[in-house]
Amino acid sequence: MSKKNTGSKSKQTKKETAIVAEAISKSEEFLNKYKKHLIYLITGIIVLLGFGFGYMKLIREPRREEALAQLFPAEQYFRVDSFYLALNGDGNVLGFKDIIDEYKAISGQVVYFYAGVCELKLGNYNEAIDYLKKYRSRDEIIQARAYCNIADAYACLDQLDEAITWYLKAARYRDNAYAAGYYKKAAILMEEKENYQDALKLYRTIKDKYPQTIEGFDIDKYIARLEMLMQQ
């Protein structure tokens, strides 16, 4: 190797070393200048993480366990159709309404579903709608059922357009197993509004997509009756 190449590489190495040294020097200068600020920042992060962990372990988790314990007797009343006691409690245990007031949804979103259904069964339709609209679930069956219950409440309030909208939302929610029933409810309300064409479309949807369901077994008579009515 020539001396010229050796000298060139040596100069390059020295240049790179100088750049690294300068970078280290600037880093040290930055650390010295802002050392206190960095210490405060790191300390603050540690404190926040500690508070977060402490909140989860010492406050939120115990409150969730407490809420779940309160939820259990209300669920027992719900299962035996004691909707008033399930919603309002019996004086010894809390009902779903009290659990929501005290704990919100810390015990799970299902508390809104329970409260909504209770209000619906008790004839408190606006309250039922308010609770059920707060319910969110990844369970396609229960979520669709919540939409259907909202529709039922609107139907009881004689708000048929809203009811139809929510029945269709229930029916089309991830093609759930009870879609045929929701389509049928929507079609019946459409008939009440004399919207026969759209009602017929929904009956035919049941016939084509859900022939093995309870609704599908006798859907032909609904189709035949409506076709005759439209021909008059």
Image: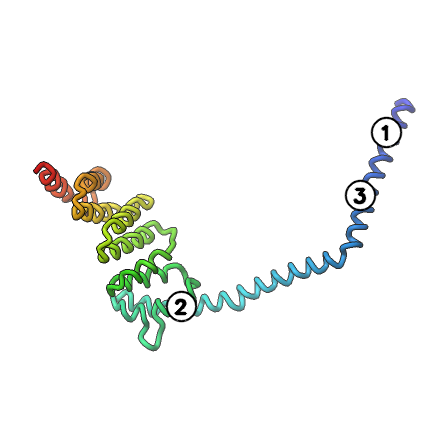
- Residue at 13 percent across and 43 percent down: it is 222
Q: What residue is drawn where x is 30% and y is 52%?
A: 147
Category of crowding for the residue at label 3, using alpha-carbon neighbours closer than 10 angstroms: few (below 14), some (14–19), many (at least 20): few
Along the viewing direction, whichever of 196 and 45 lies nearer the viewer? 196
- Disc 2 to disc 1: CB gap under 8 Å: no
User: Of the numbered discs in the image, which one, if any, rests on residue 189?
Assistant: none
Residue farthest to the bottom, as pictured: 91
Please give left or right for residue 227 compared with residue 89 in the image: left
- Quarter of the image holding residue 43? bottom right
Q: Earlier in the sequence, mark 2 or mark 3?
A: 3
Q: The residue under label 2 is which amino acid type? A: Asp
Q: Please name the residue that numbered disc 2 is placed on.
A: 101
As drawn, 230 above or below 109: above
Say which element carries label 1.
helix
- Tell me where residue 74 appears, x and y as whole percent: 33, 68
Query: Which residue lies under the disc numbered 3?
Result: 23
Residue 225 as seen in the image, left or right of residue 214? left
- Comparing 212 with 132, the one in front is 132
Q: Are marks 1 and 3 in contact (CB under 8 Å)?
A: no
Q: Name the residue located 31 percent from the left edge and 75 percent from the top edge.
A: 90
Q: Which residue is mark 1?
A: 9
Where 112 sits versus 227, above or below? below
- Identify the amino acid type marked 1: Lys
Q: How many other residues sit within 10 Å of disc 2, few (<14), some (14-19) or many (≥20)?
A: few
